[in-house]
Image: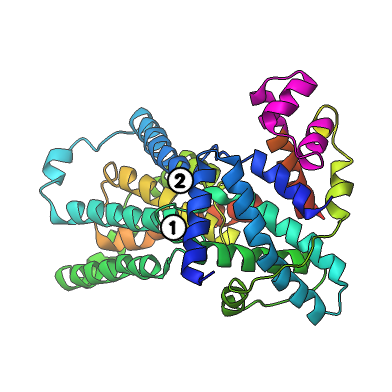
């Protein structure tokens, strides 16, 4: 076939069925619905949510997970678009470890050293490690599906970013159920749980986002 | 034509194409191809690969640009998008052919400014892949590519709806890109 003939073929297929922007918007709606439904079906808010909302530790935990999700989401909508700069958002992602470090240092300053280990181990480590990955499966699937319309330079990396965003949604929901509010607990277990989701996203990206 | 004028022209064509204007899209692809060819030939020459192989690379890159055109945001300039698409796919395609390369983005940008008038050549990669198509996909592809028929004309010939012909054509193109990838 001559290149001109291929061009004939391509031009007759001109209409774009599914634009990346639309696919991602749909994916966000699906992700929140899927994670939310599963969350309210399995656990729901913690019983003392109203009191908890007056506690600095709880509000901070919720805030960090939401900020984390928003930054990861902004990175995700850019990473599959050739020619769009992602560096500012990659740097913005560093905001989360910075916030966590500050809160951990503050916690260490106010808590007696004898309580550190107990606060870090907490009561819900198992739940945290299993429920965050569980809640993130729907969102991760939705994001990977949408990113199949994208053109990432590095498919594994794009998948990992989808994992960060999916883990962020899951963590934000789970945070409103979990009664361990110490930054020591969050810095350890939430990080591991989101790390698991990110790893899964990386593998999914390598498998399904290559183009 | 100045770079800026060219870029604006490409953007305008591509915007119309996304809305379904086949003619504008044809103009866009025809205008981009010579630049693509210069780059592909230059890389093949660098490896002592026959110039004919370059045309296979050109076709593969065109197909990728086509299938991923939804990643271009029409509110942004098209040059950065197309340069990166070309660079990434050029590297991919050459690598699959066993030639490891690094294509600096500046090179791509520079070549996009050259006017090349060389003629296109017949290539075998696509033919080999299209042979695996079943009817009526094969007739549809044949009519549209070689004979230059439109979707509407082809629909009348094979007695299918325009929508069904569109779907068949799109699937054929997807199959083509999948075969490239698994090579």
Any magenta on residue A141? Answer: no
Image depth: mark 1 or mark 2 in front: 1
Chain to which mark 1 belongs: A
* Magenta segment: B139-168
**Badge 2 element:** helix
Any magenta on residue B150? Answer: yes
- Check the image and name the residue furthest to the front: B1
Q: Main secondary structure of the magenta part?
A: helix
Chain to which mark 2 belongs: A
**Label drawn at residue A26:** none
Would you name the residue on which mark 1 appears?
A78
Percent from the top left, x then y, of residue B79? 51, 65
- Is A12 on the left-hand or right-hand side of B14? right
The answer to whether the residue labelled 1 contacts the one labelled 2, judged by CB atoms less than 8 Å apart, is: no
Does residue B160 show up?
Answer: yes
- Is B39 on the left-hand or right-hand side of A159? right
**Label drawn at residue A130:** 2
Percent from the top left, x then y, of residue B21? 55, 40
- Quarter holding residue A63: bottom left
Closer-to-camera residue (B153/B64): B153
Rate crowding at label 2 as few (under 14), some (14 to 19) or many (20 or more) other CA atoms within 10 Å: few
Percent from the top left, x then y, of residue B78? 49, 60
Indicate which disc, 1 or 2, sits on the residue closer to the N terminus: 1
State how many labels appear: 2
What separation in Å lies between label 1 and label 2 (alpha carbons)?
Answer: 29 Å
Residue under the point 24% across and 69% down: A114
């Amino acid at each position: 076939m001559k290149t001109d003939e291929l061009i004939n073929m391509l031009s007759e297929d001109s209409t774009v069925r599914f634009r990346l922007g639309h696919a991602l918007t749909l994916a966000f709606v699906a992700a929140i619905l899927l994670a939310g439904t599963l969350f309210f079906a399995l656990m729901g808010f913690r019983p003392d949510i109203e009191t908890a909302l007056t506690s600095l530790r709880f509000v901070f935990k919720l805030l960090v997970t939401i900020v984390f999700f928003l930054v990861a989401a902004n990175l995700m909508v850019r990473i599959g678009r050739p020619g769009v700069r992602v560096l500012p958002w990659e740097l913005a992602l560093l905001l989360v470890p910075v916030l966590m470090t500050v809160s951990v240092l503050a916690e260490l300053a106010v808590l007696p050293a004898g309580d550190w280990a107990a606060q870090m181990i907490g009561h819900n480590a198992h739940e945290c490690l299993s429920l965050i990955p569980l809640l993130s499966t729907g969102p991760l699937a939705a994001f990977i599906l949408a990113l199949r319309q994208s053109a990432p330079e590095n498919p594994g990396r794009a998948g990992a970013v989808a994992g960060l965003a999916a883990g962020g949604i899951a963590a934000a929901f789970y945070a409103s159920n979990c009664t361990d509010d110490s930054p020591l607990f969050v810095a350890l277990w939430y990080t591991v749980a989101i790390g698991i989701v990110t790893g899964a996203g990386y593998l999914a990206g390598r498998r399904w986002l290559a183009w | 034509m100045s770079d800026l004028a060219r870029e604006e022209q490409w953007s305008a064509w591509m915007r119309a194409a996304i809305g379904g204007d086949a003619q504008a899209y044809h103009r866009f692809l025809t205008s981009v191809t010579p630049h693509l060819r210069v780059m592909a030939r230059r890389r093949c020459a660098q490896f002592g690969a026959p110039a004919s192989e370059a045309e296979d690379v050109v076709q593969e890159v065109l197909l990728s640009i086509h299938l991923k055109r939804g990643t271009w945001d029409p509110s942004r300039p098209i040059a950065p998008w197309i340069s990166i698409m070309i660079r990434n796919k050029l590297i991919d395609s050459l690598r699959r052919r066993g030639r490891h390369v690094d294509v600096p983005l500046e090179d791509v940008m520079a070549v996009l400014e050259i006017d090349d008038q060389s003629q296109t050549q017949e290539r075998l990669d696509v033919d080999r892949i299209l042979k695996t198509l079943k009817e009526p996909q094969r007739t549809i592809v044949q009519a549209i590519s070689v004979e230059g028929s439109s979707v509407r004309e082809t629909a009348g010939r094979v007695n299918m709806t325009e929508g069904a012909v569109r779907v068949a054509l799109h699937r054929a193109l997807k199959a083509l890109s999948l075969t490239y990838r698994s090579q």
